[in-house]
Every structure is written in C-alpha cells, then in structure tokens.
C-alpha cells in the first residue's frame, strides 16, 4: 500500500512556527531542481495554493509495505511438584505481553513508519505482566 508523508508548509512556518526538516532540502539556487523536489521559500507569501499543491503532489507518496514485530507473549505455569515444595499455591502462572515492538523492514526510502503517518501519532510500546495464583 502507499501513504502520503508530510513536508514543509511555508504558510504554517511563518504563522505558527511549525518547521519541517525538508526546509533544509528546499530549492535555493538555480539548478537545484536537479537535486530536490522541495519548492523554494518565497517571502512574502501571497497565496497558500503553492503549499497545498506541493503537499498534495505525488512526490510525497511513499510505499507503505513493511514488516513489523507486533506482539510477543510469554507464559509459564509452575507444576504442582514445584509449588508444593516452596510455596502454598495449588497453581501459579506468570505471564508477560509486549506490543508494538518495532519495524524490522520498511519499503519506503525515507525510513518512515507508515502506521505513524496514518494515525498521526507514533505507536506506543506497551508491556504488561500478569500473575495468576490459586490457593
């Protein structure tokens, strides 16, 4: 699948001070069109149509294919023999669960997490532990 990455928006930069790393990649000198797709910064800004056009263009479309390590679950159940010798439980189970571990491979050349750009926020790493005991 594909996703659209975000880029510089000069109107937002001037009004709200929202910067972007693509500002350093902008067209600055004649001939830069050979090495960048990021438009030049023109001040004063007379229209925002230029930003809208660039941010809706196909140069910002990236491949979303990726391989993610999503879930790991561990569980251990203690046997009756182990428990009778040391603890007063009839049964005891320890477990843990880890979610959103990370990306192993990404198809896009920008190195971006496509799920982050789809939802707007990075996926949080979550870890949980469990204990189940029967007396």
Image (cartoon, helix red, strand yellow):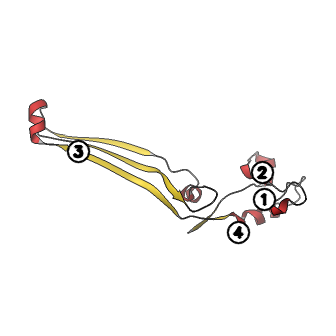
Q: Give the mark, 3 or 4, whose residue is nearer the N terminus.
A: 4
Give the residue at mark 2. Answer: 23
Q: Gap between marks 1 and 4, in whole Å?
A: 12 Å
Q: Label 2's element? A: helix
Residue 7 position within the rendered picture, expressed as x and y whole percent measured from the top left: 71, 56
Q: Label 4's element? A: helix
Give the residue at mark 4. Answer: 58
Is 116 left or right of 19, judged from the image as shown? left
| Above-or-below relation of 16 to 56 | above
Q: Give the mark, 2 or 4, whose residue is nearer the N terminus.
A: 2
Q: Nearer the viewer, residue 73 or 133?
A: 73
Give the residue at mark 3. Answer: 76
Is 122 left or right of 99, judged from the image as shown? right
| Above-or-below relation of 20 to 114 | above
Residue 115 position within the rendered picture, expressed as x and y whole percent measured from the top left: 54, 58
Using a 10 Å C-alpha cutoff, classify the residue at mark 1 as few (fewer than 14 neighbours), some (14 to 19) or many (20 or more). many
Give the residue at mark 1. Answer: 38
């Amino acid at each position: 699948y594909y996703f659209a990455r975000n880029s510089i928006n000069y109107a937002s930069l001037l009004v709200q001070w929202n910067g972007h790393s693509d500002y350093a990649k902008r067209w600055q000198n004649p001939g830069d069109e050979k090495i960048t797709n990021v438009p030049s910064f023109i001040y004063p800004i007379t229209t925002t149509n230029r930003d809208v056009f660039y941010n809706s263009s196909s140069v910002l479309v990236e491949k979303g294919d990726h391989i993610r390590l999503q879930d790991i679950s561990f569980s251990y159940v203690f046997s009756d023999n182990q428990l009778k010798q040391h603890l007063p439980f009839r049964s005891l189970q320890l477990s843990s669960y880890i979610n959103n571990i990370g990306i192993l491979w990404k198809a896009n050349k920008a190195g971006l997490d496509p799920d982050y750009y789809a939802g707007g926020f990075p996926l949080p790493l979550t870890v949980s532990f469990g204990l189940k005991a029967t007396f």
